[in-house]
Image (spheres, grey):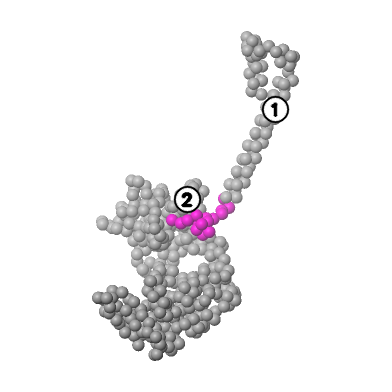
Amino acid sequence: MASIVNYNGGLKRIEFSLTPKGPRRILRLGGVNAKTAGTWKAMVETIIGDKLANRPHDAEISKWLGGLDETMLAKLRAVGLADGVGVTQTTLQGFLDRFFAGLSVKPATVISLGNTRRCLRDYFGDDRRLDAITPEEADIWRTWMRDHEKLAEATIARRVEQARQMFKKAVRWRLVPENPFSEVRAGTQVNKKRMHFVDGATAKKVLDACPTVQWKLVFALSRWGGLRCPSEHLLLKWGHVDFDAGRIWITSPKTEGHVGKEGRFIPMFPELRRLLLEAFEQAEEGSEYVVTIARDPKVNLRTTLQRIMERAGVAPWPKLYQNLRSSRQTELAQRFPIHVVCAWIGNTRAIAQEHYLQVLDSHFGEALEFSAQAQQKAQQSAAGSDTQDMISTGVENEKTPENQGNVMPRQSLASDDMTRDWAVSGSNG
């Protein structure tokens, strides 16, 4: 069905036909070795077999196709081999298998996308033809997640965005002519009801209830350092802690894929310095990492923190660690320029505004106090202005040499003390 041809002293190509009596086509591989050429030949023959049988690709082929770069995919498209089994034959399950096989993202992202995958399969069915999913059905799918699955609006928004991302790839792979999810309303991915400000007094209670310095560090780095837990805690090394300069280098795996965003410096806030010194004194000789307890897979940071909070007599708030980080950014934003705060926290102004910054009751109290002070100053200013006007009016009505038509220069009256006082008073009026 397909054959490997060597030419030009080491270059290789695959010659094949899509049908038994069809014209021969050429796929140029370049200077690959014999083993790689053999793999390509086997994959090409399997893809042709799937096309002839009108069946979706299996997981192995989907994974292989998903791992190719755009250059090789373009070559396959040019010879009719990178369109799955044809637009009319690709199933939802076949496409999703292929999409996930080619993913190169963090584990947490795979889990999140997996939830969207499950919702798509539950509603549309594994055998649903990809091109048969219409924009109208995509809208209904969103409503189904709200009414049937009882998902929060923020969760629905995230899954709509992810479905849009998935089907954008299907359009690029020419499996569907258009993206049925492109116009589905996503909405905000932020659930404001789950945002909670952890004030300093409450945080102090929880900190005091932590059983060890290590647990105090985990909590403090989240609340007063604004670190992402646990990823940024786990990467913090003693070599990143500069006690003399009062700075800490935070490695950020979430943003490391962006140029210049591999990490950030944060101030060694007083709440952190004391605990870091204590932890350094207790650290074993040659210890590399600052936080050690979270490295044990048996330790559940969320569950343990909830127990600590119960011991402290504090009711657990939603999104335990994210709200600690949100509280710190909200707190810092009241004292420092927002671009500085975002640099310390490791996010952008847009993300901070949407996901982290909170409006507190104390803001309303401060606004009322500010308004009262402004009103008091305005009243004092008005009273002072009225008094000054009265003084000025009295001076204008007083009989003076100028008022009586005397044109004698003022400096000639300088020898008269009373006249001198009048001259000074009039010039300030």
- Res 339 visible: yes
| Along the viewing direction, whichever of 200 and 56 lies nearer the viewer | 56
Report which residue position mark 2 lands on.
339
Residue 231 in percent (x, y) is at 39, 62
Whether the magenta-drawn stretch holds residue 358 is answered as yes
- Res 148 visible: no
Q: Residue at x 48, y 78 (%)?
A: 175
Q: Quadrant of residue 12?
A: bottom left
Q: Quadrant of residue 157?
A: bottom right
**Mark 2 in CB contact with mark 1 (< 8 angstroms):** no
Report which residue position mark 1 lands on.
389
Secondary structure under the numbered disc 1 in the rendered image: helix
The disc placed on residue 340 is: none
Residue 286 in percent (x, y) is at 26, 57
| Along the viewing direction, whichever of 367 and 347 lies nearer the viewer | 347
Q: Amino acid at mark 1?
A: Asp
| Along the viewing direction, whichever of 252 and 4 lies nearer the viewer | 4
Q: Quadrant of residue 186?
A: bottom right
Q: Residues within 10 Å of mark 2 (few under 14, many from 20)?
A: few
Q: Residue at x 47, y 76 (%)?
A: 174
Secondary structure under the numbered disc 2 in the rendered image: helix
Residue 51 in percent (x, y) is at 43, 86
425 sits to left or right of 214 = right
Q: Quadrant of the C terminus?
A: top right
Q: CA distance from mark 2 to mark 1?
A: 47 Å
Question: For the residues carrying marks 2 and 1, which lies nearer the camera in this image?
Answer: 2
- Indicate which disc, 2 or 1, sits on the residue closer to the N terminus: 2
Q: Which residues are magenta?
A: 346-362
Whether the magenta-drawn stretch holds residue 397 is answered as no
26 sits to left or right of 197 = left
